[in-house]
Amino acid sequence: MRRGSIASLIGIGIVAGGIAAAVALALPWLPTPASREAGRIDFEFWFVVTICIVIFAIVAAVILYSVIVFRAAPDDDSDGPPIHGHTGLEIAWTIVPLLLVTAIGISSAIVLSKNDALGKNVLHVDVTAQQFAWTFSYPEAHGLTSATLMLPKDRSVQLRFTSLDVIHSFWVPQFGQKQDVVPGLHTTLHITPDRLGTFPVICAALCGLGHATMRSTAIVMTPAAFDKWLASQSKAVTSPSAGQAGKAVFADNGCAACHTLSAAGATGKVGPDLDKLATYAKQAGQSLHAFIRASIVTPNAYVQPGYPKNVMPQTFGTSIPKPQLDALVDYLAANGTK
Ligand code: CUA
């Protein structure tokens, strides 16, 4: 091979590789990681992308060079010289991909096993998925439930999933992993959040009409702020007489997304206006407390005229611990007086 052709090949390769690298780097393909696991996955992603760019540059260089230099002259119908086999080349194009694929396999296995390895002092969170809501429960805090996933930074967290109906899929893009939530199976996901912030919790499996609305929020807070939140919420669970308890339960279970309640600053319009609970109870011919409790525990038993059935989740009766439920009923009875 002439010196000039090697120089041209290298030149074309650098241009092609440069363009591919620019496309890879300039576009925001992945969100900024917010967990150690996502950081490792990002490393693996870029490891593979780098290999791909190098291979692309070599292939593009050889193709473009051949197209330009070995182009047949017009009206030249002659065959090229017959070539059969090139042992050295064949060994090279077998060994090189073998090494690359093995390297990707080994590094992926290391990332997966590191991502699955629980750290010390693991925080367990029981995640319940149902059409179309997420509920997060903290066994360490008397089963406190929340519609927002509160997490401390830099602590190993194991999410344990349960589905009450169909297959859902838990996904926080910044945490870098998806986990199917399957009825009858207990799946788990390990996360070590390493960036403070608020991130979307998305259902990534088509699970019914409300699939697109099955979203929540994950908030990563400092360990001190998390402990404070846990302590204040646990207090609400264990001594429900405290006036703030019901309000906390209302906020934690996402009621404000669908209901209006002035006392809680809630302006949802999907479900009945909770400011008017007293009027609704009278229409239903029930006492206020009994009406509120039944509407939460067995929502389809009586549905306020003008609102559809099957929209209010059927499962609050089992997902909210009794002290929290009592606090919520008291809170709603005290504030829904119109
Ligand atoms: Cu749950 Cu889609």
Image (cartoon, helix red, strand yellow):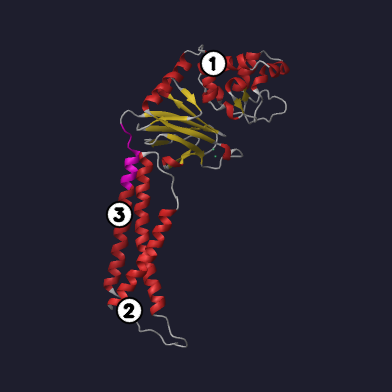
Q: Is mark 2 within 8 Å of ligand 1?
A: no
* Mark 3: secondary structure: helix
Amino acid at circle 1? Ala
Q: How many marks?
A: 3
Q: Nearer the viewer, mark 1 or mark 2?
A: 1
For the residues labelled 1 and 2, the Cα–Cα distance comes to 84 Å
Q: Which residues are magenta?
A: 109-119
Q: Nearer the viewer, mark 3 or mark 1?
A: 1
- The reply to whether dot 2 and dot 3 touch (C-beta < 8 Å) is no
Q: Nearer the viewer, residue 134 or 230?
A: 230
**Of the image marks 1 and 2, the number of the one nearer the N terminus:** 2
Amino acid at circle 3? Ala
* Residue 327, numbered label: 1
Q: Nearer the viewer, mark 2 or mark 3?
A: 3
Q: Measuring from the top left, give residue 114's x and y in whole percent.
A: 32, 41
Vertical placement of 293 versus 24: above or below?
Answer: above
Q: Measuring from the top left, give residue 213's x and y in whole percent.
A: 58, 37
Amino acid at circle 2? His
Q: Name the image quarter holding the N terminus.
A: bottom left
Q: Residue at x 44, y 85 (%)?
A: 73
Callout 2 crowding tier (Cα within 10 Å): few <14, some 14–19, many ≥20: few
Q: Name the image quarter holding the C terminus.
A: top right
* Residue 103, numbered label: 3
Q: Measuring from the top left, give residue 163's x and y in whole percent.
A: 51, 33
Q: Which residue is mark 2?
A: 84
Residue 300 visible somewhere in the drawing: yes
Residue 322 visible somewhere in the drawing: no
332 with respect to 201 (left or right): right
